[in-house]
Amino acid sequence: MIVLGIETSCDETALCLLETRQNGGDFEYKILANIVNSQIDLHREYGGVFPALAKREHIKNLPILYKQILTISAMREDNIDLIAVTQGPGLEPALWTGIVFAKELGEKLKVPAIPVNHMEGHIVSTLPHGSNPDFDLKKLKSLQFPSLALLISGGHTEIVRVEKIGQYKIIGRTMDDAVGEAFDKVARMLQLPYPGGPEVSKLAEQARKENLPKTISLPRPMINSKDSNFSFSGLKTAVLYTLKEIGNLSENQKIEICREFENAVTDVLISKTRSVMDDDEYKILIVGGGVIANTHIRLAFEALAKEYGIPLYLPPAGLTGDNALMIALAGALKPKTLETDFKADGNLSLDKAC
Ligand code: KG4
Ligand code: ZN
């Protein structure tokens, strides 16, 4: 089956063409073409994603990228069997651009255009093997159930019980800011460019390398609360107050704040995940979403999974951020009852994935 994946939930226009087949119990796939067109440079001057601009860019880029993936893959469009497109969550004007494009193409090619939950995409993005997902025939890692997924991105932070692919229960989520959002806001306070996550992380690493003594303490919000929810807005405000109190920030204080902020976020993520893992026996720990590009957080989860003696599934390099490969894969893995009458849903929940 040839599957086209389309992702336009935020500031990346992404398209992917996959060839998939079921070989006995194995799901096999080959990446024919995979393009991610980032609008980050355009949004940077606004200090975050500007929805009207994202919409305009997606509309402009979708037909161009579609032509490109057909050229790269040397595939005729009438070979496409299925179109999988992100339905939500995300910015609704941006989501609509992908959905309209998918539906019109589906009508033209007389193939189904089906909805995919973006967060399910981030779960599935952890299933490809190895560091070079662009090469050759691939199999997916097998999942065992229940698995536990922590999803940490720019818009979401949630702990999810995975009963099977397509069946999810949200156990906890952020009450305010998402982890990536908190990284981005702290970066802005420190006058670092958008997106701030990688910038804060780079400075935090520098502070660790220089072994700077600890002079600043930030809170670990909700670390001892009985539920599995998160809150990161208080942590962000604590950074703001610390900056006000310090006044003239030295370079060492700046990188120390980054380290302490990253440590605080990591402590909370690990502690919450640990207490969910203590409540039930999960077979696999999955961590997906853009923030898992963060080396410090990755290492902390590697240690946690090792301690519990279960496999840790992380997205390979190139699949941590938003991409259409994860959308095409999630679409290809869906049961064959295909829903084609759907609307963009900016708040789509994983509880509703099927
Ligand atoms: O999943 P993603 O690409 O887009 C959404 O669905 O939101 O996540 C983007 C988020 C941004 O907030 C970005 O700052 C954060 O992931 N991020 C990081 C790192 N790389 C990306 N946060 C911390 N450390 C990083 N290395
Ligand atoms: Zn995402």
Image: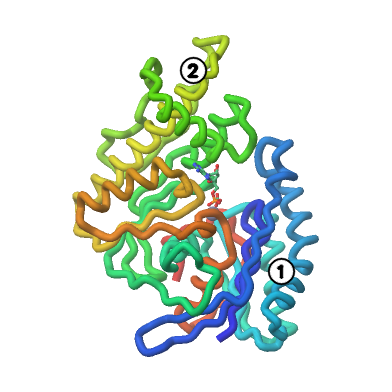
Quadrant into which the C terminus falls: bottom left
Residue at 62% x, 68% y: name it: 34
Q: Secondary structure at mark 2?
A: helix
| Residue placed most toward the observer, 224 or 198 | 198
Residue at position x 61%, y 69% from top? 85
Left or right: residue 178 versus residue 143 is: right
Residues marked 2 and 1 touching at CB (< 8 Å): no
| Residue 117 % position (x, y) | 52, 64
Q: Which mark is residue 100?
A: 1
Q: Nearer the viewer, residue 240 or 16?
A: 16
* Residue holding disc 2: 253
Relative to 228, does residue 32 appear above or below in the rendering?
below
Disc 2 from disc 1: Cα separation: 48 Å
User: Label 1 is placed on what type of residue?
Assistant: Val
Q: Is residue 84 visible?
A: yes
Which residue is depicted at the point 27% across and 47% down? 303
- Sequence-wise, which precedes: disc 2 or disc 1? 1
Q: Name the quarter showing ligand 2.
A: bottom right
Residue 98 x/y as whole percent: 68, 65
For label 2, being within 8 Å of ligand 1 is answered no
